[in-house]
């Protein structure tokens, strides 16, 4: 990646500024700030009457110290090109950047003393409102989610975080990938829960936006009924993508007209038709396996729902990623005992306020979600999707076409490094 000086990058950002762009500096410099650049003070806090500021946790007393922070800016719905200048003139640093509900964008970036690295990515921001008459029906637990509030939030974290500046610029030209699904896809706000939808952002650069509309406990039909699909469609344009992973909760629906080849298949057809009507491409993802072992093998727990999704995809010529098979391979490769490291299995007291053991064989921790995101990307590569042109070069360096990520040989759990967010949730996500 070509490295520019911080001042050169800021000058470029300023020249490109518009009515929907912001430029913030967190560390003072001797020379005057560039025109339009805002020097942020520790006393600047985001409130109902301010448009930007530190948020959620205490402001750093001094911004040149190794202190994680959240920074929020009030913006309307849309896609935003974020550039963060990471590093410090005074010390070495290791910085991780996430946005909104823990979407990972920059991972453990090490910089030497005096080195500043500019990293860019696209963050999709959305609210529940569709138009003057309609809005998404949020669940009570979603009312405080960062994905649905009135601002775009950036989290600076890491072993020794350092961020000198951030620019935010509206960019609706890039294609958007709309994620639809349940708790295995949703952006989870709190530790130790995670999903592949908030990890896949790590591997896509500033040529594409990932918009996650998934929510815990949803089925294909309830997703439609709650106006979640309608919200995604209201923002969709020609050249976009819709990725849908369902079947996990759908199998538990009972009553007249329910079933894999009835209600479920009909709902999937709705996703296809509505997406194509807007010039976008639908993609199906079969449901992740549950961690259900017998004699060292994963047992099938999804009835005929994965097969029904494959049937609809074949009939309607929809690209399909077989995550159902890949997760079986992944869990079996780890083995019954070691595979708990991919799920929310933690003894009581592992997190502040955790009074009971966590033994969840459905929902992933950050490591498990991180590995599944790579499975989904490899599914995209098998389909040779144009979307792959937006992959970051470092992913292609790690996993060239000649040696792709293989779920039968997952990354070692002990080598995965994750800096916890300051939020913890004892209640498990909806669905099982």
Image (cartoon, grey):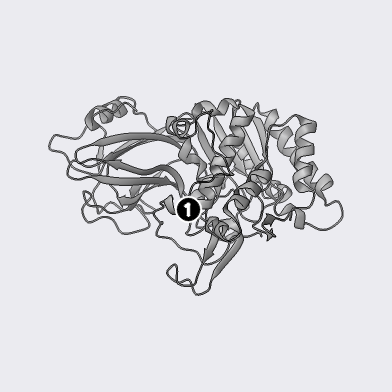
Residue 368 horizontal/vertical position (percent): 53, 51
Say how many tags the image has: 1
Q: Secondary structure at mark 1?
A: helix
Residue farthest along the left direction in this orientation: 30
- Quadrant including the C terminus: bottom right
Q: 392 and 330: which one is in front?
A: 330
Residue at the image position 22 percent from the left and 52 percent from the top: 65
Q: Is residue 93 left or right of residue 20?
A: left
Among the 4 quarters of the image, the one containing residue 261: top right
Q: Position of residue 349 (x, y in %)?
A: 45, 72
- Residue sitting farthest toward the right: 256
Q: Is residue 134 visible?
A: no
Neighbour class for label 1 at 10 Å: few (<14), some, many (≥20)? some
Q: Is residue 22 visible?
A: yes
**Residue nearest the viewer, comparing 74 with 394:** 394
16 above or below 188? above
Give the residue number, with chain letter if any, for mark 1: 413
Viewer-closest of 341 and 104: 341
* Residue furthest out toward the bottom: 355
x and y percentages locating residue 331 in the rendered image: 61, 52
Give the residue drawn at x 57%, y 63%.
428
Rendered location of residue 274, percent (x, y): 71, 34
From the viewer's side, name the closer residue of 40 and 325: 325
**Quadrant in which the N terminus appears:** top left
Q: Is residue 235 left or right of residue 28?
A: right
- Image: 97 above or below 363: above
In the shown orientation, is residue 334 left or right of residue 66?
Answer: right
């Amino acid at each position: 990646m070509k490295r520019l000086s911080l001042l050169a990058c800021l000058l470029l950002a300023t020249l490109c500024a518009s009515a929907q762009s912001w430029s913030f500096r967190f560390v003072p410099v001797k020379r005057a700030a560039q025109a339009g650049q805002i020097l942020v003070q520790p006393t600047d806090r985001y409130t109902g009457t301010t448009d930007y500021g530190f948020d959620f946790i205490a402001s750093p007393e001094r911004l040149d110290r190794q202190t994680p922070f959240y920074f929020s800016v009030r913006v309307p719905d849309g896609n935003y090109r974020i550039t963060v200048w990471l590093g410090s003139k005074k010390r070495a640093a290791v910085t991780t950047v996430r946005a909104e509900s823990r979407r990972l964008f920059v991972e453990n970036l090490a910089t030497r003393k005096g080195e500043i690295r500019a990293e860019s990515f696209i963050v999709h921001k959305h609210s529940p409102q569709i138009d003057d008459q309609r809005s998404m029906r949020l669940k009570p637990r979603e009312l405080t989610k960062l994905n649905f509030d009135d601002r775009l939030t950036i989290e600076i974290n890491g072993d020794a975080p350092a961020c000198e500046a951030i620019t935010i610029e509206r960019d609706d030209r890039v294609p958007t990938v709309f994620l639809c699904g349940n708790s295995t896809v949703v952006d989870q706000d709190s530790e130790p829960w995670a999903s592949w939808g908030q990890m896949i952002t790590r591997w896509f650069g500033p040529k594409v936006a990932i918009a996650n509309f998934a929510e815990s406990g949803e089925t294909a039909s309830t997703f439609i009924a709650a106006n979640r699909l309608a919200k995604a469609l209201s923002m969709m344009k020609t050249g976009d993508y819709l990725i849908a992973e369902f079947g996990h909760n759908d199998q538990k629906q009972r009553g007249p007209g329910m079933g894999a080849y009835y209600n479920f298949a009909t709902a999937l057809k709705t996703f296809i038709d509505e997406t194509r009507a807007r010039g976008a491409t639908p993609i199906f993802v079969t449901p992740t396996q549950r961690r259900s072992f017998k004699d060292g093998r994963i047992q099938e727990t999804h009835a005929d729902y994965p097969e029904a999704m494959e049937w609809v995809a074949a009939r309607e010529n929809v690209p399909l990623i077989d995550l159902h098979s890949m997760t079986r391979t992944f869990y079996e490769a780890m083995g019954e005992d070691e595979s708990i490291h991919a799920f929310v299995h933690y003894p009581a007291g592992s997190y502040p306020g955790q009074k009971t053991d966590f033994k969840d064989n459905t929902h992933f921790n950050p490591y498990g979600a991180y590995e599944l995101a790579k499975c989904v990307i490899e599914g995209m590569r098998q389909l040779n999707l144009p979307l792959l042109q937006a992959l970051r070069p470092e992913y292609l360096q790690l996993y060239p076409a000649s040696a792709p990520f293989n779920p039968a040989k997952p990354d070692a759990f002990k080598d995965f490094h994750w800096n916890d967010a300051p939020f913890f949730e004892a209640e498990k996500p909806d669905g099982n």
